Amino acid sequence: MDTPKTMDVPNPRRVLALASSDQSHVLSRVLKDLTGTAPEPTTSTSTGPSLAGITHMLPLKTAYYTTSVPIWIDLVDEPAEWAETFLSPEAREVLGVLGGVAVVFPMAGNDDAAKALVREAGRVVREGLGGWGWDGVGLGIGVGEGSADAADAWEGLCGESGLEFVHVRGGERDEGRNEFGEKMGVARVLESLEANDWAQLDEDYLSDDGNDGETGHGDGELDPESLEFGFDRADFEGLKKAIWGMEETTAGESSADDKKKAEEEEVLGEEEVEKLEVMMRKLQAVRDLSAGMPEEERKRLAARAVGEVMKDF
C-alpha cells in the first residue's frame, strides 16, 4: 500500500495567543514548551521589552501535512476594550485569517483579569469568528497547580466561552492520558492544534468580471503604494469604482439609464468622501495589524482587505 503523500501548507492561518499584560512570563513558558523555542521580546516599545505584537512560529508535522503556523502574541490590559477593537469592522480581515485562539492564564489565585479575558475572547470567537460554526480551535490554557474545584470552575468558564480548557501543570504530572483517554498539558494543546485545518482558501477578490480595466492617476488622487502594504494601483482603481459607482456601463443599458448614471457620477459630495475615508482607515488598520509579517503574507491580507471593502461599498 502506498504511503499517503504529506501535504505542505505554505500559507497557514494564524493563532492568536493572549494573556493579561502582567502574565507575559506565563505565556512565554507555554510557547517555549509548545514550540521548542522561547519568543524573543521586542525592544521597540516605550516601556521596555515586550512580547506584545510579535510573531512566534510553531512548526507542525503530521502524517498528513507539514507547516509552520505563525502565532500572533497579544498582551491585554483592558479585555473589554480589546474585544471591541477585534470586533470592529477594521479588524474583520485579521479575524478572517485566524485558525486558532489561545488564552493563557495562571491557575493560582482568583484572577479577575484572566477571567475577564477568557470571557471577552469567547465573545470574539462567538461574535467575530462564528462561534461553534467557526472552523478553528479555541483553547483556554491554565498554567500551574490548582485545586480540583478551581479546575472545574475554569473548565466551566472556558466552556461557556467556546474554548477547550487545558490544564498545564508541567513535567511528569502531564505525562500519559487522563480518564477520558486524552493527552494532557502541552501535549494536549499540540494535539488540538495538529488536528486543525490550517489551509486558507485562495480567494480572488479583485477580478470578479475578469476585466483588468485601465489605470491612471492625477495629481489629486491618493497613492495606494503609500500604504506600504503590498497594495497596488489596480486594486485601488477597483475600490474607487466600487465606492463611487463608476463601473463601466454594460452594452445592453438604455440611453436613459446611461444619462441617469452619468448624472449620479458627477456628484461626488460629502458621502463619497466619507466612504473613501472609511476605506482608507480600514486599510490603514489592517496594515498596522500586519506589521512585521513577510511581504507575501501582507499581500494576501491586503487582498482580503480589498475584498471586504468592496463588499461593504
Image (cartoon, rainbow, N blue to C red):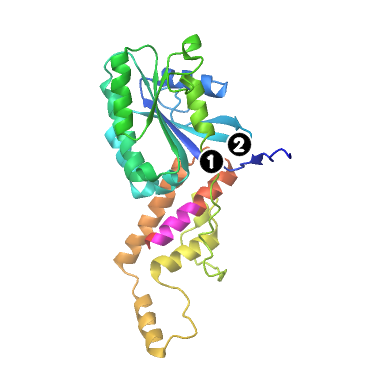
| Vertical position of residue 141 compared to residue 227: above or below | above
Instruction: Judge the density around disc 1: few (<14), some (14-19), many (≥20) Cα neighbours within 10 Å.
Output: many
Residue at horizontal 32 percent and vertical 31 percent from the top: 159
Residue at the spot of label 2: 67
- Judge by depth and name the residue closer to the eye, 76 or 130: 130
Instruction: Judge the density around disc 2: few (<14), some (14-19), many (≥20) Cα neighbours within 10 Å.
Output: many
Quadrant in the rendering for residue 267: bottom left
| Vertical position of residue 220 compared to residue 120: above or below | below
Q: Are marks 1 and 2 in contact (CB under 8 Å)?
A: yes
Circle 2: element type: strand
Quadrant in the rendering for residue 46: top left
Q: Which mark is residue 198?
A: 1
Image quarter (top left, top right, bottom left or bottom right) of the N terminus: top right
Amino acid type shown at disc 2: Thr
Q: Please tell me which of labels 1 and 2 falls first in the chain.
A: 2
Magenta highlight: main SS: helix
Q: Is residue 297 left or right of residue 90?
A: right
- Judge by depth and name the residue closer to the eye, 66 or 273: 66
Residue 259 seen in the figure: yes
Circle 1: element type: loop
Q: Which residues are magenta?
A: 304-311
Amino acid type shown at disc 1: Trp
